[in-house]
Image (spheres, rainbow, N blue to C red):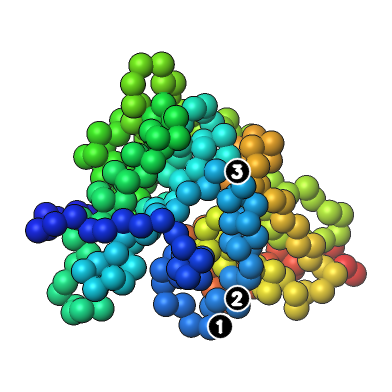
Amino acid sequence: MADPGSGHPPRVVDLSPESEGSYLLCLEDWPGSLTREAGDAKARWVERMRHRGLRVKLALDDSGRIGGMIQYLPIEESPALGRDLHFVLCIWVLPRSPAGPSERRRGMGAALLEAAEADARALGAKGMAAWGIALPAWMRASWFRGHGYRRADRQGLSVLVWKPFGAGAEPPRWPPSTGKVPAPVPGKVVVGGCRSGWCPGQNLAFERARRAAEPFGDRVAFRVDDAGDQAALLAWGRSDALFVDGRPVRTGPPPKVERLASLIRRSVRRLPAGR
């Protein structure tokens, strides 16, 4: 999300029906196999959340191509806790332009964030919140701090930042950790967890886990809770988490089916004989 200077700001537009397909894939040119593998969880999440305040804006380059996106919604519908704020779920700028390998999409991140903030103000929000990573990576917290955001809370590497628009705004917070894992099933390895649906990468991880579990038949129980609302969020203490036999699995980037199958196989071998 680096934003070197540019001669003029990128053009930011609202999501249109014509661009929704690209948005559902986070602007990535995924091959058809990956598109099918990730399933339709993101589309179902969008259909539900568009009636709960989901907003999406796109940044266009000089040729009119989509080069960046931001999605945000009322914090009451987000993975964080708070009130009267809007929350940035994701801001993503493609690192390269089709015009040439050396041309970056300059200034799109800042333009998208400014447009979202202006929209949130117009909607009556008292501030904007976002999550960032405490590492020099995608959605890094330091980038938001460079745009006037301050730290509100932190869980591990996930930093919750916010920018109040005026007096009376209250800082957001992460939900308290509950330590919840999928409920055990006697005689079976349980694979699953909770999934919000908004991130195609997380959706891909869960679909791969489902595929990895299938060959083990009734020795494995696959269970996924919908964490797309705040009641589920509070129950789990998080919005997306995958487990194999109660052990957390790293899902960024999405693990391969073979890796997940290996983890499941180890747990299956520990089942009592005859199962």
Which quarter of the image is occupied by the C terminus? bottom right
Image height of 141 relative to 126, above or below: below
From the image, state whether disc 2 or disc 3 is nearer to you.
3
Judge left or right: residue 239 versus residue 164. right
Determine which residue is flagged by label 3. Answer: 52
Residue 132 lies, in percent from the top left, at 37, 44
Q: Residue at x 21, y 69 (%)?
A: 62
270 or 257, which is in the foreground? 257
36 or 6, which is in the foreground? 6
Q: Residue at x 18, y 55 (%)?
A: 9
Distance from the alpha carbon under mark 2 to that under mark 3: 27 Å
Quadrant in the picture for residue 198 = bottom right
Tag of residue 222: none
Residue 122 lies, in percent from the top left, at 40, 35
Q: Earlier in the sequence, mark 2 or mark 3?
A: 2
Q: Earlier in the sequence, mark 3 or mark 1?
A: 1
Q: What residue type is disc 3 on?
A: Arg
Judge left or right: residue 69 versus residue 114. right
User: Which residue appears farthest toward the right when viewing the image?
Assistant: 274
Distance from the alpha carbon under mark 3 to that under mark 1: 31 Å
Distance from the alpha carbon under mark 2 to that under mark 1: 6 Å
From the image, state whether disc 3 or disc 1 is nearer to you.
3
Determine which residue is flagged by label 1. Answer: 33
166 or 172, which is in the foreground? 166
Residue 121 lies, in percent from the top left, at 38, 33
Judge left or right: residue 3 versus residue 115. left
Image height of 169 relative to 1, above or below: above
Tag of residue 37: 2
Q: Residue at x 52, y 58 (%)?
A: 199
Q: Dots 2 and 1: beta carbons under 8 Å?
A: yes
